[in-house]
Amino acid sequence: MDARLLDILVCPICKSSLEYRKSAAELVCKPCKLAFPIRDDIPIMLEEEARRMSADEA
């Protein structure tokens, strides 16, 4: 993931900053408890593509 891209991306729902989890290839929004996938170095920032996270994961 490009560091410059990570600096400007925000959650499409709540506009919070995102945490990059390299090992899982995800961008995580803690307030929404959503994990957006990264496929072929492209973040998929669609709510319907995001994975709901459990309270333990967030």
Image (spheres, grey):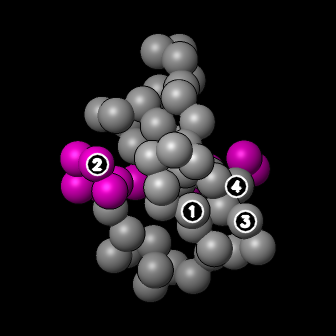
Q: Is residue 32 above or below residue 55?
A: below
Q: Which of marks 1 and 4 is nearer the N terminus?
A: 4
Q: Residue at x 63, y 53 (%)?
A: 37
Q: Residue type at mark 1?
A: Ile
Count residues near mark 4 (Cα–Cα under 10 Å), then give few for <14, some for 14-19, many for 20+: some
Kind of element beneath mark 3:
strand
Any mark on residue 44, and which? 1
Label 3 is placed on what type of residue?
Arg
Q: Where is residue 19 in the image (x, y as percent from the top left)?
A: 46, 51
Residue 22 in view of the camera: no
Q: Which residue position holds label 4?
A: 25
Q: Residue 13 carries which label?
A: 2
Residue drawn where x is 57% and y is 82% of the image: 2
How far across and down, in percent of the image, does residue 30 sit? 38, 36
Magenta span contains residue 49: no
- The Cα–Cα distance between marks 4 and 3, rounded to whole angstroms, is 8 Å
**Of label 4 and label 2, which has the lower sequence position?**
2
4 or 3: tag closer to the N-terminus:
4
Could you tell whether 30 is left or right of 44 in the image?
left
Residue mark closest to the camera, 1 vs 4: 1
Q: Are marks 1 and 3 in contact (CB under 8 Å)?
A: yes
Q: What residue type is labelled 2?
A: Ile
Regarding mark 2 in the picture, which secondary structure is present there? loop
Task: Please say if the residues under marks 1 and 4 sit with CB atoms less than 8 Å apart.
Answer: no
Q: Mark 3 points at which residue?
A: 39
Which is nearer the N-term, disc 1 or disc 3?
Answer: 3
